[in-house]
Image (tube, helix red, strand yellow):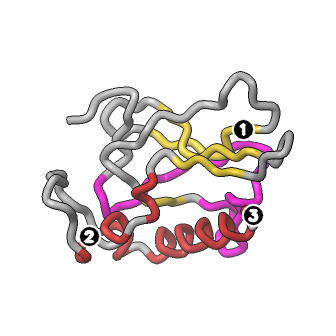
Amino acid sequence: SISYPNSHSGKNGDYQHVTVMEPIHPVMRSNVNRSGIIELLPSHPHEGANSIPRRSKSGRVIATGTSILTGRVFNLVLAFEADEGQGRAIVDSSFHHFLDYNLDPDKGCPSYVTEPAGSGLKSNRQARADTKTYFLNLAEWLS
């Protein structure tokens, strides 16, 4: 029920196919997949809109997702290199990617969450491995 500029990439507990932008950013690399990139990440019923500020000299889109309701492509992950006294940063379209309920709906959710949950992450080994790789890459790149 949340409308644009939010996008619906899938249910909590499911995964989405992502498009990794060239050149491949270190956060989006995978040593497990033959493609060499992360292909699947957690989905969410309302992904936020992200864009690079005009004044940014170092920000870029490193991965996109697609709304399953509209087919609209949206910026999923943005990366900012250290610049003018500021450290590195990542902007993810949904902080929910990092929460227990999104990763495992069996953990339960707040009472205001009314969307039905999925089980794709639980049943897809690659989706779990890609998500773990994303988290590890993210921590390493930001450290």
Q: Which mark is residue 60?
A: 1
Q: Residue 8: image x %, image y %?
A: 34, 41
**Residue 81 visible in rendering:** yes
Residue 116, above or below 93: below
Q: Which residue is mark 3?
A: 141
The type of residue carrying mark 2 is Pro
Q: CA distance from mark 1 to mark 3?
A: 15 Å
Taking the view exactly as shown, the residue that stands out farthest to the right is: 84
**Residue 19 visible in rendering:** no
Given residues 142 and 71, the one toward you in this image is: 142
Residue 124, above or below 93: below
Q: CA distance from mark 2 to mark 1?
A: 32 Å
Q: Residue 19: image x %, image y %?
A: 59, 46
Q: Which residue is mark 2?
A: 105
Going from N to C along the chain, the mark reached first, 1 or 3, is: 1
The type of residue carrying mark 1 is Arg
Q: CA distance from mark 2 to mark 3?
A: 28 Å
Q: Residues within 10 Å of mark 1 (few under 14, many from 20)?
A: some
Q: Which structural element holds mark 1?
A: strand
Predominant SS of the magenta segment: loop
Taking the view exactly as shown, the residue that stands out farthest to the front is: 85
